[in-house]
Image (spheres, coloured by chain):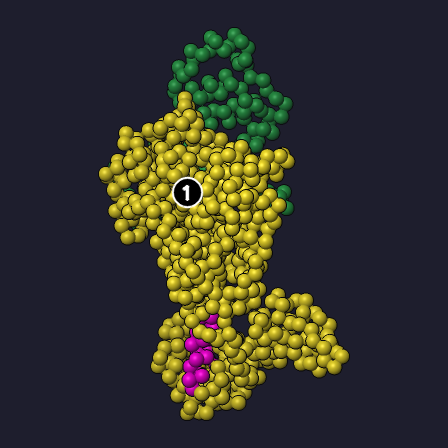
Chain colours: A green, B yellow
Amino acid sequence: METVCLNKSDDAFVKAVEAESGQRVSRCYQCGNCTAGCPMFFTFDYSVSRIMRLIQAGQKEQVLSSSAVWLCAGCETCTQRCPNEIDVAGVMDACRHIAGRERKFGARAVSAFFKAFMDSVRFNGRSHEVGTMALYMLYTGRVWTDVELAPKILPKGKMPLLPHRIAGRKEVAEIINRFNQGLSDPDLVRAGSATQGASAKEAVS
Amino acid sequence: MRIGVFICHCGSNIAGTVDCAGVAQRAAAYPDVVYSTDIMYACAEPGQDAVIAAVKEHGLTGVVVASCTPRMHEPTFRKAVERAGINRYMFEMANIREHVSWIGKDVEANTNKAAELVRMAAAKLRLNRELKPKSFPVTKRVLVIGGGVAGIQAALDAADAGLEVVMVEKQPTIGGKMAKLDKTFPTVDCSSCILGPRMVDVAQHPNITLYAYSELEEVSGYVGNFDVKIRKKATYVNWDKCTGCGLCTEKCPSKKSYDRFNEGVGPTTAILIPFPQAIPKKASIERDYCRLFNQGKCGVCAKVCPTGAIDYAMQDEIVEVKVGGIVAATGYDLVDWTVYGEYGAGRYPDVVTSLQYERMLSASGPTGGHIKRPSDGKEPKDVVFIQCVASRDPSIGRPYCSGFCCMYTAKQAILTKDHIPDSQSYVFYMDIRSPGKGYDEFTRRVQEEYGARYVRGRVSMIYPKGGKLVVRGADTLMGGQVEVEADLVVLAVGGEAAAGSPALAEKLRISYDGYGFFMEGHPKLKPVETNTAGVFLAGACQGLKDIPSSVAQGSAAAAKAIGLLSRNMLDSDPQIAFVSVNRCVGCRKCIEVCPFKAIREIDMRGQPKAEVIETVCQGCGLCNATCPQGAIQLSHFTDNQILAEVEALCRF
């Protein structure tokens, strides 16, 4: 283990996480209730409460290179249990977005699946399971993953080999292109979430 | 009038952002000001001496001090000017610390504002009149509300000092929460062995009158002479006849009443004596569970009672007493922990509260001091304690630390090992808070000698599995998730202000905070006083605290009451309303708005007029603001004085 230098706190990173999640990480008093209830804990390199602590300490590298931010299932048990009403899942989500923009993929299989799914939707206008699987195998190089399931599933006709393309797929592709553009341009994301927030407020009032 | 103005630096508190010498210079030009200076610490002895010397040297007839809030030092300076030979009401204070220097950094703006405030104070002072207090006799009797350990201590100390004491207790017995405890930390003394004799002292003390199963109905009057109405709730048992023999409780056929004293650990009868050492040891009927009241027939208790004490027709009774001072000692209640769905919200019988566990540990409790699982009556081996349940949890509106749970949990873990030597305790905690004499050593002993396993983290869920309860939490020091299979789970539930505290505070005309705890006069210097003269606080009603602190506050509140009532006469505050009879048209509006019933209608040569009862008026000024004629005025705050201030401020 390396000694963490507390002077080297990346305050800009802390501010970025707080701005993108809309949460104040200083509210966390490290009770561990998020970790206690996390159903994905067994897959994590750092527990949720440790991620929260690392964010508080401005340890950007450790947070963004962790697998936990990618493996979080977003079930929001942590958010529900947090005595300080922090949307912990929202904080994890913000970290995942920042990591994606900085091309840091702590769990490559997860980001590869994410890309495979989005590409499949971009091509077809809707998801195509076999296509998603093929792309996933291509992006990860894990060619034999789950292939043993094919003889059981294919005869049932649940997974057609050819995609069913919808009429508006160009428009769907446009949405996804805009999203990908946004991923590489954080200002666009922030502007987007700001207008989203404003419209949500309008809806409430 | 010859006015002297003194601008206090308060070290750098004021001088840091206000040009004090500049303010003094400007003040010298205000009307009637003949002397003006700045001073390092006006409240300190040299400062007060300087004020007195200036009064004598310059023949001042009025003094303005610009310094801190009048709540801090108005009494100090009033006494100082009195020593200098002028009336204490020929003094005005301008608050240039809390209202100026502490809230702004702009020196020029602050200096201007300070000068304006001094101008207002001087303008008002020009219209001040000498006021003299009247004195009135006091009633040498104290009312103590609440018969827990804090109230008991206050009552005994006041009674020993020779005062008469009236104690009002909501429950059928005194003793409060402490009477429910098995042992106390950090000495592991038997709770009822140390409290019991004090309870008996209350019952036997010639100066103490106890009204159990009674509540405060109404308070009127003022310091030294409060008129109190007490509602004696119907017990349906004539306590003058009841001997506490307990025959009725043995024969009562309604055996499924909720046992309030035992926190519902076991059922009890509809007619009951809460526990063997109850004071008074008298029976009372819980109407909601009594067959006679609910089904119309039964009457077994009346048949078996050897003294004929049962009286089903009993009604509530109102008792009126006059007291000079009041001590509120209403304690606390446990927070309703069933808001936590993740802990079963009350569905799992083997998840109990700490207070229920105390009753299980107690030899006089429903299990006879044997720890049994409520579900199957078996002895538990693995016991999990969860701390900070409903404490330090902003999500349920309880962000504060209850302060005593860390210690009682450690005590309960020790007692668990004493009762069941082959048991294992697990304690989930967030921080161990043990800042008391011998407290931290105690929390080390439970881990080192009694082998309790302390786990640093909260618990996220409890779920049943094959007759056991699985407790899943975090161990943040280990850095991960942990699970314990438990036979019994004890929740260290935090406290909150006793039910009905805000309503009582309103009756007593004292302040309470956002959680319902009563507000002390000053957090450091007036811990047991309130902002209402003659009303004092003791114990957890002011903020959660453990037994030693509650006892200390009980004694402190008693000392304050004894000090107050040691005088035969009290001075009334002359800042009260007065009526100009030639302006009063007898419209009665002031009588209607007065919250103290301090104004009455009189007949003056056939005309109705208002008259202020001087000893009752509290000087709130509502009548002054209401009077359409400007006939009723508040001394020291007349319309003309307020207008003079406004004019001093709005000169342009």
Residue at the image point whose x is 72% and y is 80% from the top? B604
Residue placed under numbered mark 1 in the picture? B276
| Relative to B467, B218 lies left or right | right
Residue found at the very far left of the displayed protein: B449
Q: Which residues are magenta?
A: B64-84
Residue in the picture at 47% in, 58% down: B209
Q: Is residue B77 magenta?
A: yes
- The amino acid type, in three-letter code, at marker 1 is Pro
Residue A28 lies, in percent from the top left, at 41, 44
Residue shown at 71% from the left, 82% from the top: B582
Left or right of B194 on screen, residue B512: right
Which quadrant of the figure has residue B298? top right
Q: Closest to the observer: B269 or B142?
A: B269
- Of residues A91 and B449, the one nearer the viewer is B449
Residue B98 vertical position relative to residue B306 in the rendered view, above or below = below
On the image, the x and y values in percent for residue B624 come to 64, 73
Q: Is residue B231 magenta?
A: no
Q: Is residue B236 visible?
A: yes
Residue at the outermost front position: B306
Q: Quadrant of residue B329?
A: bottom left
- Seen at 28% across and 29% down, the residue is B422
Between residue B150 and residue B392, name the one nearer to us.
B150
Percent x, y of residue A98: 43, 39
